Amino acid sequence: EITKEQRALIKAILAAYDRHQIPQDVTKKLLQEQYSAEENFLLLTEVATSQVQVLVEFTKNIPGFLSLDREDQIALLKGSAVEAMFLRSAQVLSKKMPSGHTEVLEERIRKSGMSEEFMTPMFNFYKSIGELHMTQEEQALLTTITILTPDRPYVKSHEAVERLQETMLNVLRKLCVLQHPQEPQYFARLGRLTELRTLHHYHAEMLTSWKTNDHKFTPLLCEIWDVQ
Ligand SMILES: CC(C)c1onc(-c2c(Cl)cccc2Cl)c1COc1ccc(-c2ccc3c(C(=O)O)csc3c2)cc1
């Protein structure tokens, strides 16, 4: 039984998640013809930059986030950006989104000059997300929970973040029971997404491999990923 407050929380988070999406004119570029590794990397960089901007706006609408310490807000965004983008791109690749970007996005990621060793874990993760058949509420809440992870580097008031995350976890736990009655283990399976952490680790190496091949990132990505 979800309380009135929890229902209001879900409504607010879902509204923010739906409102803050990458603009069409950016995602549309993924459908253009050129498929060179250079072109793919440039397009992915553009989409990732737009995704970070969208993520910042979404985060500002998480109830309680703006009352956290200012520096902690930055630390949480920097620490969760990669994982939130894995979650979002996973929705696109697992055909969860009506956008016709699934095929072209996969193609561009596979051919963006990323070393092979990251492909397998990355696309295995995408596959396991697809098999979860998350509802929109669950995706929005999971992204929120990922952002509100207290043990990110440089977070000072750990407890304040932990309290917020706990509130969201309680809601998600109840929601999973309601929305997946046939699968009592569903919430536990969502927890398995801790694989996200290992992908985060791979991602740091991905960035270095791109950088060594003299790939340029945008100022926003350099700032959020501490590159250059
Ligand atoms: C700098 C760049 C080369 C990079 O470095 N690491 C990663 C990176 C990769 Cl390659 C995989 C996972 C995470 C990251 Cl950061 C990336 C690319 O990051 C992406 C971020 C976000 C999308 C993404 C989101 C939403 C949507 C939607 C939609 O909402 O309708 C339609 S199309 C689309 C596309 C794709 C790629």
Image (tube, helix red, strand yellow):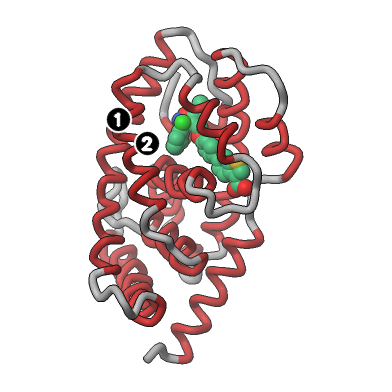
The residue closer to the viewer here, 88 or 120, is 120
Q: What is the spatial separation of the Cα atoms under label 2 and label 1, in whole angstroms?
A: 13 Å
Question: Based on the displayed image, in which of its 4 quarters is residue 120 positioned?
Answer: top left
Of pointers 2 and 1, the one earlier in the residue sequence: 2
Outermost right residue: 25
Q: Which residue is identified by label 2?
A: 123
Residue at 26% across / 51% down in the picture? 194
- Is residue 53 visible to the viewer in this orientation of the structure? no
Question: Based on the displayed image, in which of its 4 quarters is residue 178 positioned?
Answer: bottom left
Dividing the image into 4 quarters, which one contains the N terminus?
A: bottom left
The picture places residue 71, in percent across and down from the top left corner, at 42, 50
Residue at 48% across / 48% down in the picture? 94
Dividing the image into 4 quarters, which one contains the C terminus?
A: top left
- Is residue 57 visible to the viewer in this orientation of the structure? yes
Residue at 50% across / 71% down in the picture? 63
The picture places residue 212, in percent across and down from the top left corner, at 40, 9
The type of residue carrying mark 1 is Tyr
The type of residue carrying mark 2 is Phe
Image height check: is 77 above or below 18?
above
Disc 1 element: helix
The residue closer to the viewer here, 47 or 116, is 116
Q: Which residue is identified by label 1?
A: 202
Q: Residues within 10 Å of mark 1 (few under 14, many from 20)?
A: some
The picture places residue 56, in percent across and down from the top left corner, at 55, 50
Q: Nearer the viewer, mark 2 or mark 1?
A: 2
| Left or right: residue 226 compared with residue 33 | left
